[in-house]
Amino acid sequence: MAAPVLPASRLATLVGPTDGEHPAYRMVADSLRLLIADGRIAVGTRLPSERDLTNALGLSRTTVSSAYAVLRERGYLTSRRGSGSVASLPSGVVRRDTGLHLSPDVPEGTIDLTCAALRAPAGMTQAAEAAIAASPGYLCGSGYLISGVPELREVVAARYTERGLPTSADDVLITTGAVVGTAIAARALLSPGDTVVMETPTYPNIFPTLSQLRARISPVPVEPTGWDVPTMTSTIRASRARAAILLPDFHNPTGNLMPDDERASVASALGRARITAVVDETVAEIGLDHDGPMPLPFGVHHADTISVGSASKSHWGGLRIGWIRAPRRLHDSLVAARVPLDIGAPVIDQLVLLHLMRSAPGITDDRRRGLVEARDALATALRTRVPELRFVLPHGGLSLWVELPEPVATEVTLAAEDEGLLVASGPRFAAAGGLDRWIRLPYVLPPAELVEAVERLARALDRVAAGSGSRATGRRSERRGPLVA
């Protein structure tokens, strides 16, 4: 697999100004080190030659050569014959905690911000009663509906058609959530050792499946403000991947929304490379104050797309119902990949969701207003109490992607736990290491709780800055590693 190439002009933009009190070579080296450590330059990316970067930065060749030398010495740059200088991480730095463990002994009073999901909506009891009333028609069979309840498949298909992607019920499989749906797609597409293009940061609960498949990840960085499409398309061309796992709709964790023109560019690159897209649309219905119409589903731009959706964010995670929308030629392989995982989602839960989606396919206006209020309360508290933290206010989704002044996210999350606050650190979302200057803060709790959460976070930051860190040991962190959802 050829290494993706980062153009000199793009790298110069990422490095930024080089004038200051420190020598220019140190400023360039420090900027590049943080960019690589944060995952904004993906591990394995080929950096421009010293000559090209010299011209782009307007510095001397000696300055750039010295900066590259520092990075090589510290393990952030590796020289490969025929590949130039390639971004890397020092031995022992790559960490990817999947966060798939939930301890039952969380102390009372703890504020848990590891889960970006809403409480059950109003009308859940009535939906459950309607599901029970509708269930006799299904009781005479085995209950194993490999493709799902037909009426729910029709409702899901109608919603895709309404969003601009013509779909019939035969294009839809009902699954036990989006995590399982994505795992089914990955198992259907990938053989051991295959390459998959993945954003970094990204939703982390697909990592175990990719590890089991021994898949190789070709990462594409997502900036706080959106996708670097030229770098992304370059990576796609060089990857020789079989699949690309993407989250273009209010991306988790950054909240970015990919516009139609960028979707078209990425889709064109995928089409030329004959790569199937697996698109996680779990948060697609969580638009808050986005101006103008929503972009079309990615499948409109790229026919070879497996779209994965879920009710966990739009309705309630307790239902554990999701779906796959895919070209029919892939359905046999998807069903074959599904059987080892499960042989059908719970029928009663599907009927509950059917009732809810007939009333509202996404979040209701009341829940949207509540989310906007919670998001704005969290943002205001952060700006007031910890102004040194940086974030881009998203127009949708369920969380803020917050940048710390230093790469201490792991230490901060441990210190926060001692303050009664559970948060997910950036490395959990890293497809190829790094991201230790980032934490994810969902705004799914009432505003007053979020303000208190920021107060606890501020105390944790003060402790880390003072060098006291957390009293928790590494073993304690592993024992109580929170679920990331």
Image (cartoon, rainbow, N blue to C red):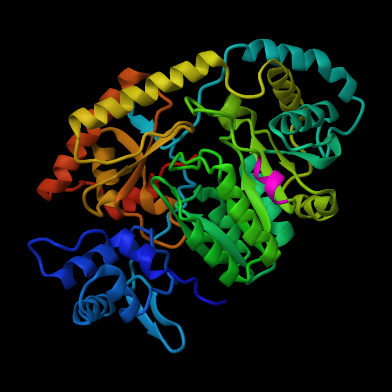
Q: Count how many numbered circles sit on residues in the image.
A: 0
Q: Residue at x 62, y 61 (%)?
A: 269
User: Would residue 251 appear left or right of 20 to someone viewing this image?
Assistant: right
Q: Is residue 323 above or below residue 364?
A: below
Where does residue 16 sit, x and y in percent of width and height? 26, 59
Could you tell me if residue 94 is visible in this image?
A: no
Where does residue 186 sit, x and y in percent of width and height? 67, 56
User: Would residue 182 appear left or right of 47 to someone viewing this image?
Assistant: right
Q: Is residue 210 above or below residue 424?
A: below
Where does residue 424 sit, x and y in percent of width and height? 38, 43
User: Would residue 61 appear left or right of 442 to someone viewing this image?
Assistant: left
Q: Residue at x 38, y 46 (%)?
A: 224
Q: Quadrant of the N terminus?
A: bottom right
36 vs 450, nearest the viewer: 36
The answer to which image quadrant residue 192 occupies is: bottom right
- Magenta region includes residue 301: yes
Q: How would you classify the magenta stretch by its main secondary structure?
A: helix
Q: Residue at x 32, y 81 (%)?
A: 51
Q: Residue at x 66, y 40 (%)?
A: 297
- Magenta region includes residue 194: no
For the record, the magenta segment spans 297-302
182 vs 6, nearest the viewer: 6
Q: Residue lying farthest bottom?
A: 81
Q: Is residue 126 above or below residue 351?
A: above
Where does residue 466 sit, x and y in percent of width and height? 10, 47
Q: Residue lying farthest left?
A: 21
The answer to which image quadrant residue 108 occupies is: top left
Q: Residue lying farthest right?
A: 140
Could you tell me if residue 4 is visible in this image?
A: yes
